[in-house]
Amino acid sequence: MNRINFASFTGHTVAVVLALLCLVGTYYFMQQGLGQLTEARQLERLPVTPIDALADGPYLISGNAETQNGTLRTPYSNTSALYYKYELTEQYRDSDGDLRTRVIESGQRNKRFTVSDDSGQVTIDPPKAVERLDWNISQSYQSERGDRTYTEWALEPGDSVSVVGNYAPSRNAMTFQGLSDLHLPALVSGQTLGKDSGDRLFNAAIRISLATGLLALGIALVLPALRIHRFWVYLIVMTLSVTGTLSVLGITQMQKEWQSIATLYETRYQQATNQPGTEAALADVAALRQLIDRNTSGLLDRWMAGRVLDNQLPLPKLSEDTRARAEAIADSRPRGRFAHSTVSFAISAGSALVAVLLLWLAIRTVKLKRLVEALPTISARSASFGLCELKGMINVDDECPFIRDPLLDKKCVAFDYKVEEKRGHGKKASWKTIEHRTESVPFWLEDDSGRIKVEPEGASVEYHEVTSETHGDRRYSVRLLDTFINVYCLGFAELDEAHPDRLTIREDSDSPFLISAREEDDILIDRGAKGFVGVGVSLGLILFATTAFLAADGNFSPDNLLVSALAVPLVLMSYIGILHYNDIVFLKNRVSRARANIDIILKQRQDLWPSLEQVVKASMDHEQTLQKAISKLRSVDLRDVDTPQKTDRLIGFEQKVKRKVMARIENYPELKNHSVIKQFMDIMTRTENYLSLLRISYSDSAQIYNTRIQSFPDLILARLFRFKPFDYFSTGK
């Protein structure tokens, strides 16, 4: 399967479609998540109100479920129930032989029933549309019979149950209309109250983090579609979009919550204080106020709470007995906690690890892009030893002949040929590779200034032409790098062993090697898009890990949305800091490598001087000046030659001595064939051009590095990590 090229028309179209899907998903999951978050937080603030303290309005009650007008019979276990949900599933094998599960039948039914506690009894009047009520009931029955599984969830008479609904005093009944205005769920639950709110918090956190991740991914896809590949643009757009979205939604949602809870509290306060002697109602109001205080977390949440509590939520006057009763009611409410918190923490930790891995992969992807941006394009004639970026046309001749591909028999310099065979049938059909081979030959890269040889072995090749043919059950495909087409080349230039007077671009283990038939801008957009997507997904996973961790512990709130909003630019700034640091380290290592290569050549040349000194002493003992010069070169400690200036002086002195040796040899014909003299002349001549290229490479690398550490924002990192500038050689190109 070929990778998507985001710079192509197909890649552009795919990016736009995926971006739109991500943005639609963002809206959907964000609305769901925020709704569940508000419901969970409102549910945690509600005290369990004794039935004798109920007045007109929404309440949370708990007690035992009892029959009122008979019971229902569950379809599979024939159990008496006030509510039941049933499902029959069947395992079967599809046409490909895979085991699958399908639902044969399902449904749910309910009846009116009552709930009683120590203080009284109230009727529960569910809506006719059963699905409009959230029935959170545990599984009560499951049976497997052959390939079929029969499952029931039932609320039986005598079961403990909690109900969130609107109390109607005239009917002494709990109904379920109008709860959404106060952001409360219409709920009948057989679970613990802490589990109910904990599950809602966790589901809300998952949806909000998923929505945020989709937003980050959508932005990462939109920018390349607009042909934007600069990471600083991505940083600004991502920060404004994600941070702005989370901040606005967090503040807006918090305002809605406090408006709802203030309305609920004021209603209960007025009802309790306007009916003297209702100590149970006063205790309920005081418990509501205590739970509001306890479930307020975060700076912004507390600030809004202070405004509402001081201005709109006065405390009722309570007797000691009523105060103690209110505290008991508030203390009986457990904090929300996800039932599978251990699993949630493990998922959170795993998501964080995957996020770090994706961030590392994104850094690797963007690293090549930033290298392409950092290196200037040079001409073939001005290429120097080291990593080079060139553009030109592929040419061939007798020294660098073309090859032909095995499918189309076309002239090319590289091909990737693959034969696949169709195996299996239907959905299980797949293509199995039975032959795959690549081949490449050296070619000339020509531009207006001249040409340079390229050996593509080991390069990452982005081919010019892709062809596929299907014959029967076999598919033949070939990718070509044609002759006489323009290509982009990023590779390491070093001396051609067969022709020491010229350079060749070839594979280097420490440097990237890319040959592409695409334009440089297309390469940047494609690499930038993949990096953006990697960062967007990793950012979504980081937010997922954070929200899952907080929600599993019962601590997730709109205030956490603001924390997440602040985390987005911090993560992105850390990412861009890593990128720039890696850039500086790479450029610094490039200079150091060029310097190390110069030192190797100097060491090779210095090793000649002791042997040459012995020959000169034996054959030219009267040449005292020459002997002193050679002795001086022999005694040089290369560890002290640690700057370009000292290297220049050493090379200059070597050249001066070399000229004197050559001049003196003319007077001693017998020395011309001496092995030491021949070795000396051969190495000095061969390394002269090499040393010149290395000095140019060093100067070019040092110039790029010095420019980067003097430019913003690399200047900050350079000073923080003490990156020092390099000196230049006295001679240039």
Image (cartoon, helix red, strand yellow):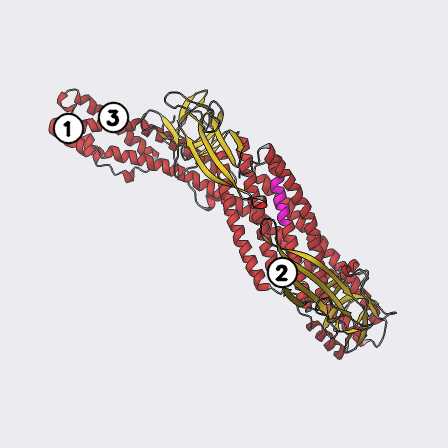
Nearer to the camera, 147 or 636: 147
The residue that label 2 is drawn on is 147
- The residue type indicated by label 2 comes to Asp
Residue 345 horizontal/vertical position (percent):
56, 61
Assess disc 3: are there few (<14), some (14-19) or many (≥20) residues with their C-alpha within 10 Å of its C-alpha.
few
Label 1–label 3 contact, CB within 8 A: no
Q: Give amino acid for label 1.
A: Gln
Give 495 or 481, whichever is nearer the viewer.
Answer: 481
For this view, does 98 lie left or right of residue 679? right
- Identify the secondary structure beneath mark 1: helix
On the image, the x and y values in percent for residue 131 come to 76, 59
Quadrant of residue 146 within the rendered picture:
bottom right
- The numbered dot on residue 656 is 3
Of residue 223 and residue 517, the one placed in the foreground of this image is 517
Question: Looking at the magenta stretch, what is its main secondary structure?
Answer: helix
Describe residue 732's horizontal placement relative to residue 416 as left or right.
left
Whichever of callouts 2 and 1 sits on the residue coming sooner in the sequence is: 2
Question: Residue at 50% of width from left, 39% of height from top?
Answer: 421
Residue 336: image quadrant is bottom right
User: Secondary structure under badge 2?
Assistant: loop
In this view, 562 is above or below 112: above
Residue 232 position in % (x across, y down): 57, 40
Disc 3 is placed on an element classified as: helix
- Decide if residue 716 is in sight here: no
140 inside magenta stretch = no
Whichever of callouts 3 and 2 sits on the residue coming sooner in the sequence is 2
List the residue tagged with mark 1: 624
Q: Which residues are magenta?
A: 212-221
